[in-house]
Image: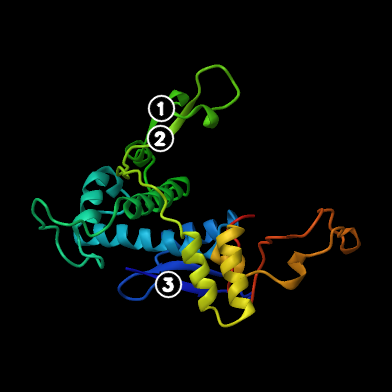
Amino acid sequence: MRPFPVTLPSGARYWTVLDDDLAVVPAADAFLRDCRFGQDRAELTTKAYAGAVALYLRWCERTGRDWRSGGSDFGLFVAWLRYSAADGSAAVVAGPGARPARGARRINAVLAGVRGFLAHAVARRDAPAWVIGHLYELADEWTLPLEARGEDTGVAYRMKARHRVHVPSAAVDRATDDETVRLLQACLSARDRLIILLMARAGLRRGEVTGLRRSDVHFLMDSRSLGCAGEGAHLHVVRRQNMNGAWAKSR
């Protein structure tokens, strides 16, 4: 099982999953196509989901499980993710004190992709409905922060994922001002300096930076003549198809 990029005649791209015979896995392909085009997710999102689904299908194949009902043993899948080799080829034989093969954030990202895949399979009736009960539990909103609750004063319920690895809280290790200045001094062109400044000071993602066009940058104090009501100097982050494959995560 492996993720594989697909380019449509229109130029749009998404990622799918191939089996060991290099044939497309139909259920995985349907889920990933729906994510990319039905839900307007980014291409890189389908890449991450394809990698997660490939790991899950590989685990089911190596352990003799049917992927449709493998969600009932999700806890064992978590242990396999934590201690199996990165390519999933080795058995889980690590003893106490062994260093995990994948971190908590990576495992949670894989579990999120697999849950979406199995939920999509249930909606298409490719998997039994009882699988959802092994993936989610019913929880009330009192466990959420106040900002995340709804406006209704009554008790509301939500679907809560049953399996999740604890992620230790740690301070964000952002680049210091001195490190940013050193990067600017190492740049050999104005373009490179602009990229550093946009990422360090404007907070743009790499896909948003490399997808910028000159028409997105407005230096005028009044840009109404350009059809823009924004005041002062500013730039626009636009999600669009780009020749270099850049994709803005923000809609």
Residue type beneath disc 1: Ala
Who comes first in sequence, dot 3 or dot 1?
Answer: 3
- Reading the image, the residue beneath label 2 is 160
Q: Taking 42 as reference, is 5 left or right?
A: left
Residue 219: horizontal and vertical position, in percent?
Answer: 79, 65
Position of the C terminus, as image quadrant, is bottom right
Position of the N terminus, as image quadrant, is bottom left
Residue type beneath disc 3: Phe
| Secondary structure at numbered mark 1 | strand
Going by the picture, which residue comes out furthest to the top?
A: 154
Relative to 63, is 162 above or below?
Answer: above
Who comes first in sequence, dot 2 or dot 1?
Answer: 1
Residue 133: horizontal and vertical position, in percent?
Answer: 35, 36
Going by the picture, which residue comes out furthest to the front?
A: 178
Find residue 7 and report its image quarter. Answer: bottom right
Q: CA distance from mark 2 to mark 3?
A: 31 Å
Residue 214: horizontal and vertical position, in percent?
Answer: 74, 72
- Reading the image, the residue beneath label 1 is 139
- Reading the image, the residue beneath label 3 is 4
Does the rendering let one see residue 210?
A: no
Q: Are marks 2 and 3 in contact (CB under 8 Å)?
A: no
Who comes first in sequence, dot 2 or dot 3?
Answer: 3
Q: Are marks 2 and 1 in contact (CB under 8 Å)?
A: yes
| Secondary structure at numbered mark 2 | strand
Residue type beneath disc 2: Lys
Q: Which mark is residue 43?
A: none
Relative to 122, is 232 above or below?
Answer: below
Please report the residue visible at 35 percent of the width from the left and 38 percent of the height from the top: 130
